[in-house]
Amino acid sequence: MRALKDEWNVIGTGRSDETIERVRRVGAIATKDNSMACRIADVVILSVKPSHLRDLLPLSRHLEGKLVISVLAGVRTSMLESEFPKARIVRAMPNINAIIGASVTAISAGRSARESDIEVAERIFRKLGDVFRVPEEYMDPITALIGSGPALISEIIDAMLLGAVAAGMPRELAYEMLLKLMEGTVRALEETSMHPAQLRDLVTTPGGTTIAGISVMEEMRVKSGIIYAIKGASDRAKELGMHMESLVLAQT
Ligand SMILES: NC(=O)C1=CN([C@@H]2O[C@H](COP(=O)(O)OP(=O)(O)OC[C@H]3O[C@@H](n4cnc5c(N)ncnc54)[C@H](OP(=O)(O)O)[C@@H]3O)[C@@H](O)[C@H]2O)C=CC1
Ligand SMILES: O=C(O)[C@@H]1CCC=N1
């Protein structure tokens, strides 16, 4: 929100005093009145949990002619278009790295959105990092890979840290070196354009330490576990969207 404030007048809403206080702390206008915020705004960003979307449906009457950007996991533009028929819809999936301006955000246009709407969404999310325009059919896997990705990668880093401690390294030293390792590996892949398997093979001396580590990873099915983790998160995004659609249909 702080990054957006440099260029736009930002109003943040919430139901609790804590949220209002958080919005105020970043210097945006804070209110509990969603209707008023929607009436004033040119662009409305929906960022409640998918299960809370139903509470926002009555706002439809204030959204005529507005650009509505939804970051809700799993919720399809077609559904938002049927609930907010007079608004133009763009769907976005950012990630938590937005807190340091390093998000990767995917955006897809709904049928009602104009080119200029997608450009506005791009301008907004570019303030928070990199932006990719994608077909909406990729949004559920992107939610898994990019939206949930920082958590999955943090789990991997945490596991490697524990491994280093188990092998006898002091935690602080291991953590500092581990973060540099992550950064260096990403840069090596980017700058050489090597496939990860090529880089792995360069490190894997016959009969050496790396193959000993990889063998354990294979025995523990770590790689399959990660493949299924991404697939499972993507399936969950799809399930959340379908669940929302059935709840909304049941209500109308
Ligand atoms: N967390 C992440 O990394 C990512 C999340 N997303 C998506 O973003 C959305 C939000 O997720 P997340 O930030 O984790 O969830 P949080 O619960 O942390 O945030 C939701 C916010 O919505 C507010 N809120 C809920 N209901 C209303 C309402 N009726 N009117 C106004 N404000 C309301 C809540 O404040 P209060 O309770 O005070 O009302 C809270 O600040 C989800 O749909 C998720 O799928 C997408 C990408 C990444
Ligand atoms: O866990 C979630 O549902 C949200 C969506 C992407 C990241 N966090």
Image: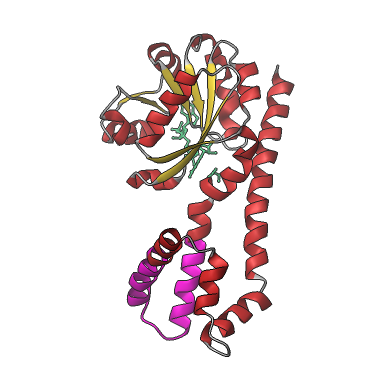
Location of residue 34 by image quarter: top left
Q: In the rendered image, is residue 15 in sight?
A: no
Residue 157 relative to residue 2: left or right: right
Query: Relative to residue 193, is residue 164 depicted above or below?
Result: below
Q: Is residue 166 above or below residue 193?
A: below
Q: Which residues are magenta?
A: 154-183
Q: Nearer the viewer, residue 191 or 17?
A: 191
Residue at position x 63%, y 41% from top? 140
Residue 250: give x, y in percent of width and height: 74, 22
Q: Main secondary structure of the magenta part?
A: helix
- Percent across and percent down for residue 11 are 35, 23
Q: Nearer the viewer, residue 85 or 20?
A: 85
**Residue located at (70% from left, 20% from top):** 251
Q: Nearer the viewer, residue 21 or 67?
A: 67
Q: Please give the name of the residue rendered at 45% of the width and 79% of the height, measured from the top-left corner.
A: 164
User: Furthest-bottom residue in view?
Assistant: 207
Q: Position of residue 124 (x, y in %)?
A: 38, 30
Depicted 8 relative to depicted 48: above or below = above
Residue 164 among magenta residues: yes
Query: In what quadrant of the picture does the C terminus appear?
Result: top right
Frontmost residue, 226 versus 60: 226
Q: From this viewpoint, is residue 39 visible?
A: yes
Q: Quadrant of residue 6?
A: top left
Query: Residue at left 57%, top 30%?
Result: 52
The N terminus lies in quadrant? top left
